[in-house]
Image (cartoon, rainbow, N blue to C red):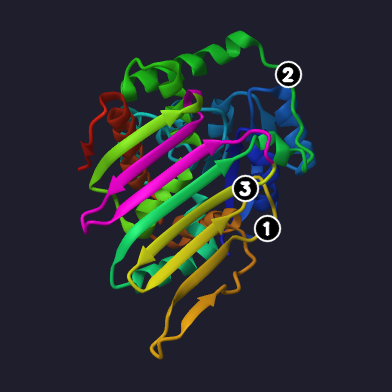
Amino acid sequence: MNRVRIGVVGCGAVAQVQHLPNLKHLHREFEVSIVCDLSHGAAEAAAKRFHIPKFVTNYTELLDSDVDAVLLCHGDPKTEVALAAFEAGKHVFIEKPVCFSLQEIDAMVNAQQKAGTVAQAGYMKVHDPAFQLAKQEVDKMENYRFVQINHLHPNNSLHLSQFDVQRFDDVASEALSPARSAREAARKDAIGDVPPQVERAFYLLSGSMIHDIYSLRVMVGSPSEVISAEVWAEGGGVNIVFAYPNGARCVATWVDLPDLWDFKETLEIYGREKRVLVAYPTGFSRGILSEVTIQGIDSDGTTYRKNPAIEWESAFVRELRHFHACITEGVTCYTPLESARKDIELIINIVKCYANRSAVKCD
């Protein structure tokens, strides 16, 4: 098997809890030769902990090394590093959110096409064995009539406390200014000047509810219209109603419940004769499987309920295996950057719907 030399930019929580342990597990597929973080302490600690030979604090040094691919899981926005990586001829895996504006994603897609390399969005939910099993069931439905999403989100610190996440406070404030300015510029390009609660909702849509948005698109396709959108709790609650070309409706809800331990994220698809439900654990967990419930009526008229056994391999591991196959075998990417554009556009349309208090047609 061809090993891919990979460098990781960003040594924070998702790298320490998921990506670096999983890359170490996939030692036959990947060789992690270098890591990078603005924090010298974080980069050094990650290199030591995961036995990585080199660490740097400037991403250009990583791109100048002999890596074939880079995994971007640093703070947002990731656009500058992604564009530089494509210019350097690297394959690129970009953790969500890929970016915030259509201008950013168009620049990334153009750079990737010019480079001719693989570009994969870090949309791990659709690689989940439970999601893929559920999609097989949904694809066999004659038609779906109603979809419901519930995403009840505790503070991530409640779950991160279960892991040995090392944090450092050694980055000067002025070193973070370019990223803050770029983030603000991208937000303005996307949605303009909006009240603080709408800005907060925009970022939670982009950073957390994005999992529900892309999963919904892959499961049943893109909506034809954002019928309504509500933002409350100072931007900590969002409720959306989507319309679909077949007349179906989707009600999607995200709520911040910071002091509640239990995480709940479900995707439910209802047809005339079948219901399929997927329930996910928090992304900051290891070894906890998603669940699928299938309900219906069989040919004998008997009502049934099934909870199929789910394969143990995690969605995070599967998406890395897929990235490797795209690079070494030419497999078509399941979550290309072009698809991420649809999700960014939908988030912008949700904000427009709320701001203008009127439905927004989707292309």
- Residue 355 showing in the rendered view: yes
Would residue 256 be counted in the magenta stretch? yes
Few, some or many residues within 10 Å of mark 3 (<14, 14–19, 20+): some
Give me the disc on residue 288.
Answer: 1
- Mark 3 or mark 1, earlier in chain: 3
Residue 217 drawn at (x, y percent) = 35, 52
- In contact (CB < 8 Å): disc 2 and disc 1: no
Asked if residue 316 lies in the magenta stretch, the reply is: no
Tell whether label 3 touches label 2 (CB within 8 Å). no
Amino acid type at image mark 3: Thr
- Image quadrant assignment for residue 35: top right
According to the picture, the residue beneath numbered tag 3 turns out to be: 282
User: Dot 2 corresponds to which residue?
Assistant: 169
Work out which residue is located at the far top of the displayed protein and give it: 174
Height in image: 139 above or below 38?
Answer: below
Q: CA distance from mark 2 to mark 1?
A: 31 Å
Distance in Å between CA atoms under marks 3 and 1 = 9 Å
Question: What kind of element bears circle 3?
Answer: loop
- Disc 2 from disc 3: Cα separation: 26 Å
Residue 349, located in which quarter of the rendered image? top left
The 10 Å Cα crowd at callout 2, few under 14, some 14 to 19, many 20 or more, is: few
In the rendered structure, which segment of residues is drawn in magenta? Answer: 234-260
Q: Which of the two labelled residues, at mark 2 and mark 3, occupies the earlier sequence position?
A: 2
